[in-house]
Amino acid sequence: MKKFIKTDKYGELYIDRILFESYFPIIFTCKNDKNELFICVCCQNNSKGCKWLAGKTNGLSIVRMLRDEITIRELLLKYSSGKISIEYDNNEYTIAYGNSDWNEDSIFLPKEDSYMFAEEDEFADDISYYSALDQIIYEPENYSNVSKEVKESDDSFQLSGDSLNELILTTGSLIIRSEIKNSKTFKNLCVDLSSVTSEYKKQEEQRPVFTNIFKVYSNDFNIILDINENSFADAA
């Protein structure tokens, strides 16, 4: 991929896919060496120089934009993080984070009705590509001996099963054995749940579980989780 810009916060950004262009890319996505995804919009290209707004996002948010479910403005303001402003003038790049370019009344933000206005199947290949970026595939045969314990209490989780197929969680205080904590299943589940809590300090580094696509090759797999607005995964 072609290099776009090197940032101190996210490293080198490489142009991934161009979604709209004139004689230069206007709306495109980038990735860094961690395979993180960024939406980039060119908001100025004239005698005053070039300027781009970029934000870290995810594949499904890009898909929603391509399907005209959200505007380009909403994708930048509501479904991305980092708020990167990139300016090129006099053969020099300047990078800022969260500056006035991102204010609601900024002239550099796309207009409120800034949909892609795509024709039917115009972005079919792109939608397939970005959808696949957020897929998480769990194959039960790769996991075994999750737990054989059942904790019975009115205010506790019940955790049981010999494999991923039989893992069952119900509400309360979770008691987890060390072998479960070290399993890939537990780590993926907790990381994803933490990302949707307002208390999680590094949530922009995680992918929200409720905006990811899950494929579980089992009819027996079952997770029951009851939480309220005061329950945070990182406080457990």
Image (tube, rainbow, N blue to C red):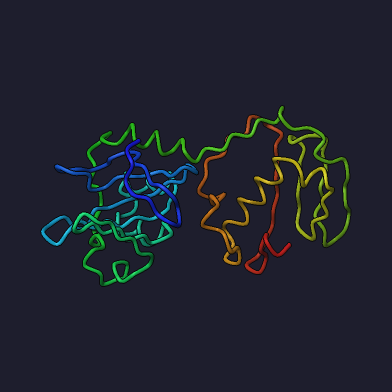
Q: Position of residue 107 (x, y in %)?
A: 21, 67
**Relative side of 179 to 235, left or right:** right
Expressed as whole percent of the image width and height from the top left, the position of residue 153 reads 88, 58
User: Which residue reaches farthest left?
Assistant: 47
Q: Residue at x 32, y 45 (%)?
A: 4
The residue positioned 37% from the left and 47% from the top of the image is 64
Vertically, is 166 above or below 173? above
Q: Nearer the viewer, residue 2 or 56?
A: 2
- The quarter holding residue 53 reads bottom left
Residue 111: percent from the left, percent from the top? 23, 61
Q: Is residue 27 left or right of residue 12?
A: left
Question: Residue at horizontal 34%, vertical 59%?
Answer: 74
Foreground: 39 or 142?
39
Quadrant into which the C terminus falls: bottom right
- The image quadrant that residue 92 belongs to is bottom left
Residue extending furthest top?
Answer: 141
The percent position of residue 148, horizontal first and vertical second, equals 87, 40
